[in-house]
Image (cartoon, coloured by chain):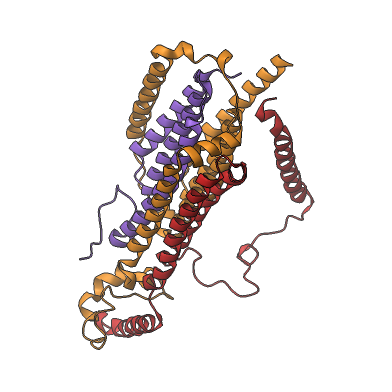
Chain colours: A orange, B purple, C red
């Protein structure tokens, strides 16, 4: 039974690792950026399988809740808000030679750090015979909320910071909002819309020609 | 049980792949996706180390909870900055010359 | 009992879902009549209306704030989920120190969300500004042929 479990775990690891690597490569290399964002979401949900293999059920749940549900939704929504980014004919891809050089540098860095990690001095102490498995959520909650409660408040402050930063950045030039709709049925707006109320007719021809054609 | 080195090799492959994306790609959103892939690799390495270490504590898992929360926050801010970049320069491509600049 | 062995039913269900989808797609491909495809057949169905313009227009950026709000609530829910899956709020040893942490955490997050909801109308144009900008753009559009030479 023990041998079967071990073999099953190794087969499962190899399966999920292959899926994750292929999906990560597709998320970087797929031509359409919408598909790339979707592949990133799938990759993030398959990474949760590793956390289940590593006896961390809450981390797996949080990975699916935050990465798959939150971050990939953020990326997909940002791609939907940027139609210029969706057009793959406008995207400049790196040349073959540059891509090969980048792949080689990344492979060298990954291999060197992997060798360093495998050769590090206390590698013998990381032996699987000593592993004590505990997936007690009570202990984790005690660690996070009771012993290190200040971290939770810091996370709350960081989330509030991101919220306030988002609203402050988006509030900066609100007059350009309807300028983002272009084409036959859209309209163009002037950046200084809230300052001038009466002189509507004088200003527009000055900045007009470069705005419409862009 | 799967040896620790398998997890570490996978984590470093993910980090290398994300670094390749960050080095080669020109689109800002793809660069962000590369950074997120690197973050996933780091998360796997940290959880594996915390499970296989001789004295098991919940420090690794608690740290990962904080890291995932901070990743959500910085992704949101980075995407808002990308929207502002697109509004100002009318592109999200770092390879293209800046076309439009507003005072 | 290792944890991942508890999730074998999930794996079986995932395989079943994939097989079911593939079989249904294949069956519908085999069974459906292969008729000529023209632009009338492949156009988007919009409740009988004729589709106008491209689907990929750009929406106002301000709607991104709602996604950021969702992510913040998501992370808050994850932290409270950890709390609710343990008994540290009910055991006498820890409940008096944890309840203050929870109250402060909720107050900070709810304060941030309330501030953003209060500032949200300021990031959009209000009705008068929209009308004004629309009139101005319409006047510019009318002047444009004259400026370009009237063709």
Q: Position of residue C19 (x, y in %)?
A: 74, 40
Q: Is residue C31 visible?
A: yes
Q: How many marks?
A: 0
Closer-to-camera residue (C8/B92): C8
- The image shows residue A180, relative to residue C136, as above or below, that is above
- The image shows residue A171, relative to residue B24, as above or below, that is below
Residue at image coords 55%, 42%: A62
Q: Is residue C58 visible?
A: no
Q: Quadrant of the C terminus of chain A?
A: bottom left
Q: Quadrant of residue A131?
A: top right
Residue at image coords 23%, 62%: B101
- The image shows residue C91, relative to residue A70, as above or below, that is above
Residue lying at the far bottom of the rendered structure: A198
Closer-to-camera residue (B57/A76): B57
- The image shows residue C107, relative to residue A1, as above or below, that is below
Q: Position of residue C118 (x, y in %)?
A: 41, 70
Closer-to-camera residue (C126/A101): C126
Q: Is residue A132 left or right of residue A113?
A: right
Q: Quadrant of the N terminus of chain A?
A: top right
Residue lying at the far right of the rendered structure: C31
Q: Is residue A174 left or right of residue A80?
A: left
Q: Position of residue C147 (x, y in %)?
A: 24, 82
Residue at image coords 31%, 60%: B90
Q: Position of residue C36 (x, y in %)?
A: 68, 59
């Amino acid at each position: 039974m023990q041998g079967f479990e071990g073999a099953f775990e190794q087969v499962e690891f190899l399966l999920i690792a292959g899926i994750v690597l292929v999906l990560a490569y597709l998320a970087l290399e797929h031509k359409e950026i919408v598909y790339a964002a979707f592949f990133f979401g799938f990759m993030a949900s398959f990474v949760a399988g590793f956390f289940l293999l590593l006896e961390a059920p809450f981390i797996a749940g949080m990975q699916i809740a935050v990465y798959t549900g939150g971050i990939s939704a953020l990326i997909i929504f940002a791609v939907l808000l940027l139609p210029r980014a969706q057009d793959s004919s406008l995207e400049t891809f790196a040349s073959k030679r540059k891509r090969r050089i980048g792949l080689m540098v990344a492979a060298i860095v990954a291999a060197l750090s992997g060798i360093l990690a495998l050769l590090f001095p206390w590698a013998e102490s990381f032996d699987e015979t000593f592993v004590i498995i505990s997936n007690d959520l009570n202990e984790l909650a005690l660690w996070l909320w009771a012993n290190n409660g200040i971290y939770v408040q810091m996370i709350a402050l960081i989330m509030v910071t991101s919220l306030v930063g988002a609203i402050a950045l988006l509030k900066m030039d609100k007059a350009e909002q309807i300028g983002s709709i272009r084409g036959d049925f859209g309209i163009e707006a002037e950046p200084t819309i809230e300052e001038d109320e009466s002189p509507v007719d004088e200003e527009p021809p000055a900045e007009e020609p470069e705005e419409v054609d862009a | 049980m799967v040896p620790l080195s398998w997890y570490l090799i996978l984590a470093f492959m993910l980090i290398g792949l994300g670094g390749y994306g960050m080095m080669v790609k020109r689109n800002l959103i793809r660069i962000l996706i590369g950074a997120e892939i690197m973050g996933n690799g780091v998360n796997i390495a940290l959880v594996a180390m915390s499970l296989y270490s001789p004295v098991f504590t919940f420090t690794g898992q608690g740290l990962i909870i904080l890291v995932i929360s901070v990743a959500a926050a910085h992704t949101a801010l980075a995407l808002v900055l990308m929207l502002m970049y697109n509004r100002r320069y009318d592109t999200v491509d770092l390879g293209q010359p800046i076309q439009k600049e507003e005072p | 009992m290792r944890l991942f062995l508890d999730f074998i039913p999930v794996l079986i269900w995932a395989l079943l879902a994939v097989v079911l989808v593939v079989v249904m797609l294949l069956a519908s491909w085999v069974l459906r009549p292969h008729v000529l495809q023209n632009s009338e057949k492949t156009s988007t169905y919009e409740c009988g209306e004729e589709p106008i313009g491209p689907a990929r227009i750009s929406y106002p950026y301000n709607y991104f704030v709602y996604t950021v709000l969702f992510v913040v609530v998501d992370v808050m829910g994850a932290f409270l989920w950890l709390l609710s899956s343990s008994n540290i709020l009910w055991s006498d040893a820890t409940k008096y120190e944890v309840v203050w942490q929870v109250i402060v955490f909720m107050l900070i997050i709810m304060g941030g969300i309330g501030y953003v909801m209060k500032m949200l109308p300021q990031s959009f144009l209000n009705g008068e500004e929209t009308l004004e900008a629309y009139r101005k753009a319409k006047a510019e559009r009318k002047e444009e042929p004259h400026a370009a030479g009237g063709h």
